C-alpha cells in the first residue's frame, strides 16, 4: 500500500538515494550535477519547504516538496519539486504525489501551484502536469543547457487551485 507522509531525519538516506541520480544526470533540475549530499539535502529539505516521502512496503519510492513560490503579494502561489525512483516509474507514484501535493496546497491555503522551470525535454513530467490541468503559461527559449540536447526551452506551468 502506497502512503505519503512528511519526511523525517530517518528518511535522509532514502531521499539522497532518490536525489543523487537525478541531480547527477543534470537533465531535469537546475542543480549543479556535482552537488554534495549535504547540499542536496539542504536544498530539498530547506526550512521554507514541507517535504514528503511516498513509500510502499516501507520502501521510499518518491519524494516531493511544497513551498511558497514567492513572498509578499505572491505568497498565495506555491511551488513543488518531485522525484520518483526509477524502479517505481509507471506505477502511479508521481500521480499520487501530485494529487497529494494539490490537496496539501489547498489545505495550506494556496490559491495556485506554479512550476517555474519545467525542462521541455522532460516529456513524462510535462504530460503528467498537463493531464492534471496545468497550463503552460510561459516559455523560456533556450533557458536550460541539457547535457545531451544542448539549449532547450523551459516551461512555466500553473494550475488554479480555487477551481476545486
Image (spheres, grey):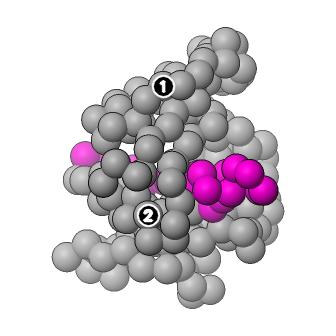
| Residue 134, image x, y percentages | 40, 36
Q: Residue at x 51, y 49 (%)?
A: 112
Q: Residue at x 59, y 22 (%)?
A: 138
Please state which of residues 136 and 89 is positioned toward the viewer in this rendering.
136
Q: Residue at x 28, y 35 (%)?
A: 131
Q: Which stretch appears magenta?
A: 67-90
User: CB of mark 1 within 8 Å of CB of mark 2?
Assistant: no
Disc on res. 120: none
Q: Residue at x 33, y 82 (%)?
A: 58
Decide if residue 164 is in sight here.
Answer: yes
Disc count in the image? Answer: 2
44 sits left or right of 118 in the view: right
Instruction: Specify whether residue 143 is painted magenta.
Output: no
Label 1 belongs to which residue? 136
Label 2 belongs to which residue? 106
Q: Pointer 1: residues within 10 angstroms few (<14), some, or many (20+)?
A: some
Query: Can you say which quadrant of the picture contains the C terminus?
Result: bottom left
Amino acid at each position: 500500500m502506497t502512503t505519503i507522509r512528511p519526511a523525517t531525519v530517518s528518511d535522509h538516506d532514502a531521499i539522497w538515494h532518490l536525489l543523487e541520480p537525478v541531480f547527477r544526470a543534470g537533465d531535469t533540475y537546475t542543480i549543479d550535477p556535482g552537488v554534495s549530499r549535504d547540499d542536496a539535502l539542504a536544498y530539498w529539505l530547506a526550512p521554507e519547504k514541507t517535504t514528503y516521502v511516498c513509500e510502499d512496503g516501507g520502501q521510499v519510492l518518491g519524494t516531493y516538496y511544497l513551498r511558497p513560490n514567492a513572498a509578499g503579494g505572491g505568497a498565495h502561489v506555491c511551488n513543488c519539486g518531485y522525484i520518483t525512483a526509477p524502479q517505481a516509474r509507471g506505477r502511479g507514484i508521481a500521480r499520487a504525489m501530485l494529487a497529494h501535493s494539490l490537496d496539501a496546497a489547498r489545505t495550506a491555503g494556496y490559491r495556485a501551484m506554479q512550476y517555474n522551470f519545467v525542462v521541455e525535454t522532460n516529456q513524462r513530467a510535462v504530460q503528467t502536469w498537463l493531464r492534471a490541468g496545468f497550463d503552460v503559461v510561459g516559455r523560456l527559449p533556450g533557458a536550460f543547457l541539457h547535457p545531451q540536447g544542448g539549449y532547450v526551452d523551459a516551461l512555466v506551468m500553473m494550475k488554479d487551485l480555487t477551481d476545486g
